[in-house]
Structures are given as C-alpha cells and as structure tokens.
Image (spheres, grey):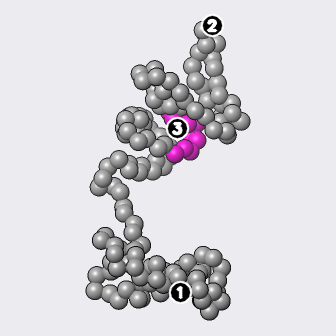
C-alpha cells in the first residue's frame, strides 16, 4: 500500500497518510458542511488510483454517487463492484423463516435444524435431543407466524 496524499499544510508541504496509520480505525469528525465527505472522497479517489481496495458504506448515498461518477469519468484498470443498498430495488431480502408456498413446514424445519447442528459441529441430533426439540419448536412457530 502506498502513502495516500491528503493535501498541503499551511506552509505548502505535502501531507501523506502512511499505510501503517491506515491499518487502524479512523474517525472523521466535524460540523455539517466542514468537508468530511469531501475528505473521504479524496481518500477514495487516492485508493482507486493506487489500486487499493476498500468498502464504502454511505447511509445517505451522496458519497456513493460521487464515487460512482468519478469511476465513470476515469479509466480505471480494475474491477469495481457496486452495491447500492440505498436503492430499495437492489436489496435482496433473506428471511429463513418465511412461509413456504405449498410445502410442508416440517421439511423446512428439519433442514434448519440440520444446518444449525452442522454449524455447531453436532453430527447427529440424537447427541443433543433437548436442543433439537427446542429448535424444532422455535423454528416451527417462527415458520408459521412469518408473513414474508
């Protein structure tokens, strides 16, 4: 990872963020309109130029839009994966307890119990009968009461 150019100090000297400093958490704090998003946008552009991967989580979507516009204007020799979660049509819902249409709920419950036991390293439900019974009750009620 290369040092990231941030700008210039009051004396006109370049300021860089060292790769080691980027490995720790960072908070960008300031009042509204003080340039927090522009600062992050500048960092993102530097990452794109340096072929450094990143994940942008933007609850408002403005920084996301600016980043996409930047990518569209510049030839970037890399894959860009866009996932815009602020677009309702882009959200893929996942409800493992949704009602199955026309299917037997006991089959779905058995599959969920098997998956849960597998995740916990239990090879046979006979090893933990109380857990299996409790999961069967929870998954059956959840499946019957789910609307989506």
Cα distance, mark 1 to mark 2?
A: 71 Å
SS at mark 2 in the image:
loop
**Residue 47 to residue 35: above or below:** below
Depth order, front residue of 92/15:
92
For residue 91, the mark is none
Q: Where is residue 103 in the image (x, y as percent from the top left)?
A: 32, 87
Side (left or right) of 58 relative to 51 = left
Gap in Å between the C-alphas at discs 3 and 1?
A: 52 Å
Of discs 2 and 3, which sits in the foreground? 2
Q: How many labels does the image show?
A: 3
Disc with the residue nearer the chain's start (1 vs 2): 2
The quadrant in which residue 72 appears is top left
Give me the residue at 64% from left, 83% from top.
122
The residue at which mark 2 appears reads as 11
> How far from the left and from the top, in percent, is residue 82?
42, 49
Does the magenta segment cover residue 76? no
Residue 20 versus residue 100: which sits nearer the camera?
Answer: 100
Are there few (<14), some (14-19), or many (20+) residues within 10 Å of tag 1? few
Is residue 50 located in the magenta-colored stretch of the structure?
Answer: yes
Horizontal side, residue 35 vs residue 18: left or right: left
For the point 52% across and 45% down, which residue is it?
55
Q: Mark 1 points at which residue?
A: 133
Q: What stretch is highlighted in magenta?
A: 44-55
Residue 48 badge: 3
Q: Earlier along the polypeptide chain: callout 2 or callout 3?
A: 2
**Is label 3 in contact with label 1 (beta carbons under 8 Å)?**
no
């Amino acid at each position: 990872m290369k040092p990231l150019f941030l700008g210039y100090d009051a004396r006109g000297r370049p300021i860089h963020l060292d790769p080691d400093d980027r490995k720790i958490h960072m908070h960008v704090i300031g009042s509204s309109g003080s340039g927090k998003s522009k600062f992050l946008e500048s960092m993102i552009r530097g990452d794109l130029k340096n072929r450094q991967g990143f994940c942008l989580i933007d609850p408002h979507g403005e920084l996301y839009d600016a980043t996409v516009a930047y990518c569209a204007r510049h030839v970037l020799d890399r894959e860009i994966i866009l996932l815009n979660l602020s677009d309702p049509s882009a959200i893929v819902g996942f409800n493992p307890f949704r009602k199955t249409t026309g299917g037997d709920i006991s089959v779905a419950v058995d599959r969920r119990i098997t998956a849960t036991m597998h995740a916990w390293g239990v090879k046979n439900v006979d090893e933990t009968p109380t857990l299996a019974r409790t999961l069967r009750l929870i998954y059956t009620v959840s499946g019957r009461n789910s609307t989506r």
